[in-house]
Amino acid sequence: MGVRRAAKGVGDFLIDTVGEAVAEVILTLLACALLACLALIAYLSWSFSPRLTLAGAGLLSLFLAHGAWQTFRAATKGRRRGLAAVTTVSFTLTAMTALFLLLYATGCDCL
């Protein structure tokens, strides 16, 4: 009885360990692919029009800054509507993507 329970425990541990390792590899590859796509978009945009790229980056920065301001300012009564809701969601998604890339793409050997 004790040997079976110990063997089952070791088997469960090995399955969990291998599963976590595979998930880590998949997430790292996904982060590297996302980083490569972002670099390709930046390169193609810059080669098309540097002025338009800088203007777009400035507008995107203002958009995300408004979302950050809406996210971190003191709460008001009621729900956020319109532009405030869109910028808040965009800022949150951008922050989560940046955190994902920071956590997983830094271990990528493609850099």
Image (spheres, helix red, strand yellow):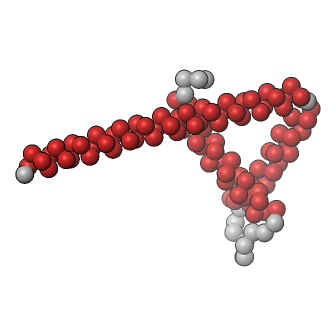
Can you say whether 103 is above or below 88 in the image?
above
Q: Position of residue 55 (x, y in %)?
A: 89, 39
For the question of whether residue 69 can be seen, the reply is no
Residue at horizontal 58%, vertical 42%? 100
Can you say whether 22 is above or below 75 in the image?
above
- Residue nearer the viewer, 77 or 94: 94
For the question of whether residue 8 can be seen, the reply is yes
On screen, residue 58 versus residue 72, left or right, reads: right
Residue at the extreme left: 1
Q: Position of residue 21 (x, y in %)?
A: 40, 36
On screen, residue 80 versus residue 26, left or right, reads: right
Can you say whether 111 is above or below 29 in the image?
above
Residue at horizontal 68%, vertical 47%? 94
On screen, residue 58 versus residue 27, left or right, reads: right
Count all numbered tags in the image, as a single digit: 0
Q: Position of residue 65 (x, y in %)?
A: 77, 50
On screen, residue 43 versus residue 19, left or right, reads: right
Q: Position of residue 27 (x, y in %)?
A: 52, 39
Residue at the extreme bottom: 78
Residue at horizontal 70%, vertical 33%? 37
- Residue nearer the viewer, 64 or 26: 26
The quadrant holding residue 98 is top right
The quadrant holding residue 7 is top left
Residue at horizontal 74%, vertical 29%? 40
Identify the image quadrant of the C terminus.
top right
